[in-house]
Image (tube, rainbow, N blue to C red):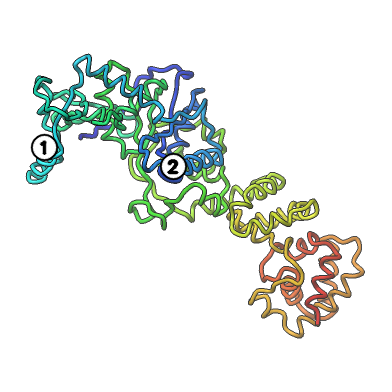
Amino acid sequence: MLHEPRLHAIPIRFRMSDIVTRFAPSPTGFLHIGGARTALFNWLYARGRGGKMLLRIEDTDRERSTQAAIDAILDGLKWLGLEWDGEVIYQYARAARHREVAEQLLAEGRAYRCYASQQELEAMRALARAEGRPMRYDGRWRDRDPSEAPAGVNPVIRLKAPLTGSTVIEDQVQGRVEWQNENLDDLVLLRSDGSPTYMLAVVVDDHDMNVSHIIRGDDHLTNAARQKQIYEALGWSVPVMAHIPLIHGPDGSKLSKRHGALGVDAYRAMGYLPAALRNYLVRLGWSHGDQEVFSTEEMIAAFDLPAIGRSAARFDFAKLENLNGIYLRQADDRELVVALEAMLPHIPGGDRIANKLTEVTRAQLLQAMPGLKERAKTMVELADGANFIFADRPLGIDAKAAALLTPEARQLIGQLHDRFKSVTPWSAAATEAAVREFAETHGIKLGSVAQPLRAALTGRTTSPGIFDVLAVLGQQECLARLADQAA
């Protein structure tokens, strides 16, 4: 397999409206982060050209395919905002069509029945191992008379692949890739039980779905050569192909769970916004100058296949968190309240907050949002920061906050409680003026008042600005919480 420089100006054979991409996951597990990026690239390419992105569930592995995985894939795509066009296509349901095409190739002399036994195939593997080369079927049934077929043996159907020359893919990412045909054997199209192989099913489905561009991971690059041979045997046009590098961990090794090889649902549970995750994923392997933050509209307008690098992208949680923090800070406060409420069932501790959402607490959450989003990088941190709004009395006080609530501090809190009774109207500005006056009167620093006050009102040593906390909680709740902690 030889790589040559990619062609940045490959002739376009399609009108914009004819562009059809597809995302074709196998439902044997969750929608992992690499699959999500592949779906995003397909979606962006189609949307930017007025085309369509189709969704095909490749569920031919009946033992490993599950409805739970299908549901997770569909849910993950919807959460990411990657809506597909038309109905979901299920590959297994099209098995009769796949067999029909195999029989067509057989009738045209472009495929043949192979009766090689498992023992014969194992002998070929053993010989290949001994000679230090990959296993290749030796074509022993390619030109034999069917009358020689052994009785009672169900054959497989193999493609009559070209024996000489080369198979070439002009890949939009990898450039020109060439395989010598002598190194590619006659692949199986139909198994002995009549079930179609993945190679055949993919080609038939992509053709019947009018797919113009196949955008997928470069672990499918060798498959591209096999599939092109099937296209050519059938006389069908070969879609434009783009094989994108896989995602690696920060250390350059294969992506694992510790690096971020998780399902999209896990990223939702960790509190990432779908728009931020889309933005992060699009920058994994694709670049557009020095720009890092993209609106969806900017992504759609700028995305193109030749700008995808050939090197594996490296996943970096720190960059994702920083980007998510940017999205949080730039988000509209009302939209952020709605987004947080939608995400609560999926994040740790979210149910407790969800059960306490009322008109009053929603209004408090909205009022607190400017201060909350400045201190958070994820929705989990945002929810955690809002904990003081939903806390039950008497407050649980964490260890650091408890250390601040000394006997002297509790006396101070009792005095503040009395001072706050007369503050009217109740606001951040009014409470700040009262606290500053209190500190000055008692000859103490503002911080010496603010820290015990924060501990008494939130149970923690960190929170949004203390005067914002006072305003959000309201006068009666603040007086009640202070009374709980006063000496």
In the displayed structure, 457 sits above or below 73; it is: below
In the displayed structure, 207 sits above or below 319; it is: above
Local crowd at mark 1 within 10 Å, few (<14), some, or many (≥20)?
few
Q: Quadrant of the N terminus?
A: top left
Residue 365 visible in rendering: yes
Residue 290 visible in rendering: no
Q: Amino acid at mark 1?
A: Glu
N-terminal of the pair, mark 1 or mark 2, is: 2
Q: Residue at x 54, y 43 (%)?
A: 293
20 left or right of 475 in image: left
> 356 or 415, which is in the foreground?
356
Q: Secondary structure at mark 1?
A: helix
Residue 312, image x, y percentages: 35, 45
In the displayed structure, 63 sits above or below 251; it is: above
**Residue 14 picture quarter:** top left
**Residue 206 picture quarter:** top left
Local crowd at mark 2 within 10 Å, few (<14), some, or many (≥20)?
some
The residue that label 1 is drawn on is 120
> 235 or 66, which is in the foreground?
66
> 334 or 298, which is in the foreground?
334
Q: CA distance from mark 1 to mark 2?
A: 34 Å
Residue 451, image x, y percentages: 72, 73
Q: Amino acid at mark 2?
A: Thr
Residue 282, image x, y percentages: 47, 40
Q: Quadrant of the C terminus?
A: bottom right
Residue 66, disc: 2
219 left or right of 154 in image: right
> 346 or 270, which is in the foreground?
346
Residue 254, image x, y percentages: 33, 51
